[in-house]
Image (cartoon, rainbow, N blue to C red):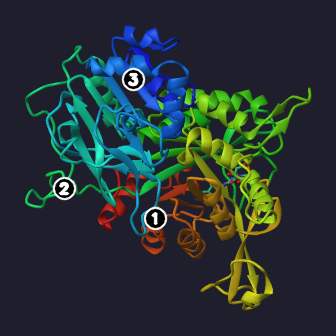
Amino acid sequence: MITLLDYGAGNVRSVRNAICKLGYEVRDVAEPADILRAEKLIFPGVGSFGSAMESLRRQGLLEPLREYLRAGRPYLGICLGLQTLFEGSEESPGVAGLGLIEGRIERFRAPGLAVPQIGWNGIAIRKPSPLLAGYQGEKLYFVHSYRAAATPANRDWVLAETTYGTDFISAVQQGAVAACQFHPEKSGQAGLTVLANFLQSRKTALAVTERTASSSSQASPEAGSGSGFPPAGTRLAKRIIACLDVRSNDRGDLVVTKGDQYDVRESGGEVRNLGKPVELAARYFREGADEITFLNITAFRDFPLEDQPMLEVLERASEQVFVPLTIGGGIREFTDANGRFYSALDVASRYFRAGADKISIGSDAVAVVEAYLRSGRRKTGQSSIEQIAYVYGNQAVVISIDPRRVYVRSPEEVPHHVITTAFPGPNGEKYCWYQCTIKGGREGRELDAATLAVACEELGAGEILLNCIDKDGTNSGFDLELIKMVKEAVTIPVIASSGAGKPEHFAEVFAATGAEAALAAGIFHRREVTISAVKDHLRQAGIEVRN
Ligand code: 1PR
């Protein structure tokens, strides 16, 4: 029996699913005394440092948790569950942490470094531990903007370090108390092994002497850092994402479909059917996708909370898929037929509870940014982006952009972000801008993709999913000009999407634009190219990928 400390902030379903998959039962902390009754406690923190500490305090959980930790009883903190063990965080000045480990959490800061760190990175192991038994040097999944640094004062706690701009602590352990910055529940088989090691360990058996695992780093032992450890030397991988566009066909069955420039109907008028959503997601997990995205492409018409089949798809997929799941479509406020109001946060919360790790906002982001720009960039805290980022963290909010190329004769012709293009327009135009659209490309707006991306970052979005209607389904390669323009405009990670036709296109987009991830749909659904063929090619091209 495992006790899960879910203080109500968000998605702990992934952790719950992973524990169940490993054959254990989960009990929730319902009252403060449950903490001291726990045999083993898992704390998967969600949201900000301040909101996590405040929730613990409000619910009377802080003191029992401190007592549990002081007694050195079996504990596994995940992500924020590691950070809260420290004294405080730059994220929430003035808020005290649990104070078990000396040091303060600070934001990632380095020129050109995309923040949050989202994706798969290695770990350099600093001491032997049964928590990492069977670990073979695989990359693990991280998603965070803040990190702890190793110092002489906390050195004894450090179990592993990872490099992202700088070296940071990716796992800590003393006796039966352990925590990791990566998400074992989302790190594929390697992560499940770490979790199983914790679940199987006898009460205090995490403190152990023999060497159990090897380092995944290319550390050079002679170089030193302030903490006395050699450089971790790990590298973040470029992510390969499989995307499933989902909608009902004319018989009402939910299918994975795929369009050509967003047109998903065959010439006979039928919605193209490329498979069942859960089966396909499970296949991509097995085949090595680093992430899976579901886009409910007609959700702008219907209210997604009435779309039970879509929620079921997510629930069932999250029981089988142990890499991050993103879901998009219809995330906006809504009033139902009975006059009941739902905020965009309500809709997103339902998706998170059903198993999403991130949500993606398309049409509503355009409306939010139009209002934001009209107001002279005044933040109200009320928009979907701000509200969801506040509760679930910036990294949980992805903005899906559906731009279309518009040619112009000169940059002065429109009040938008115009670029010079190497692919002149039908009348020889040498310039173009990228127009944002809503409702799956059905309606163009007077807003360009770069301006939208920058405004969304200001409002708290954590990542950009950059589609391109002109390129979608063409297999002709990504729109490098578009992706480079947006990548240069923002500091959050950018996922390149639309147009992948062969492995070379992935190497090209990473080399030419610096995008953090690349997404494809058609070539994977039709089995024209496998995910492993893409990764083999990237590896040969010297681009870091997850095995
Ligand atoms: O506007 O918040 O309700 O969200 C709707 C979501 O649905 C948006 O993310 C939007 O991109 C998506 N969407 C709407 N209509 C379509 C359509 O295809 N008719 N799909 C659609 C977007 C683009 C990618 C696609 C890549 C890769 N499809 O998802 O997977 O272009 O394709 P490829 O590799 O085959 O070229 P809201």
* Residue 209 image offset from top left, x and y in percent: 8, 28
**Of label 3 and label 1, which has the lower sequence position?**
3
The reply to whether dot 3 and dot 2 touch (C-beta < 8 Å) is no
Residue position marked by numbered label 1 in the rendering? 506
- Residue occupying the point 72% across, 35% down: 347
* Residue 534 image offset from top left, x and y in percent: 41, 58
In the depicted view, which residue is nearer to us: 492 or 474? 492
Q: Which mark is residue 226?
A: 2
Q: Can residue 274 be seen?
A: no
Q: Quadrant of residue 388?
A: top right
- Residue occupying the point 33% across, 68% down: 541
**Of label 3 and label 2, which has the lower sequence position?**
3
Q: Amino acid at mark 3?
A: Ile
- Marks 3 and 1, how far apart in space? 38 Å
Question: Given this view, does label 3 or label 1 mark the residue nearer the observer?
Answer: 3
- Residue occupying the point 45% across, 71% down: 508
- Marks 1 and 2, how far apart in space? 38 Å
Judged left or right of residue 545, residue 127 is: left
Badge 3 element: strand
Q: Which mark is residue 42?
A: 3
* Residue 520 image offset from top left, x and y in percent: 54, 55
Q: Label 2 crowding class (10 Å Cα cut-off): few <14, some 14-19, many 20+?
A: few
Judged left or right of residue 478, residue 413 is: right
**Of label 1 and label 2, which has the lower sequence position?**
2
Judged left or right of residue 149, residue 174 is: left
Badge 1 element: helix
Q: Amino acid at mark 1?
A: Phe
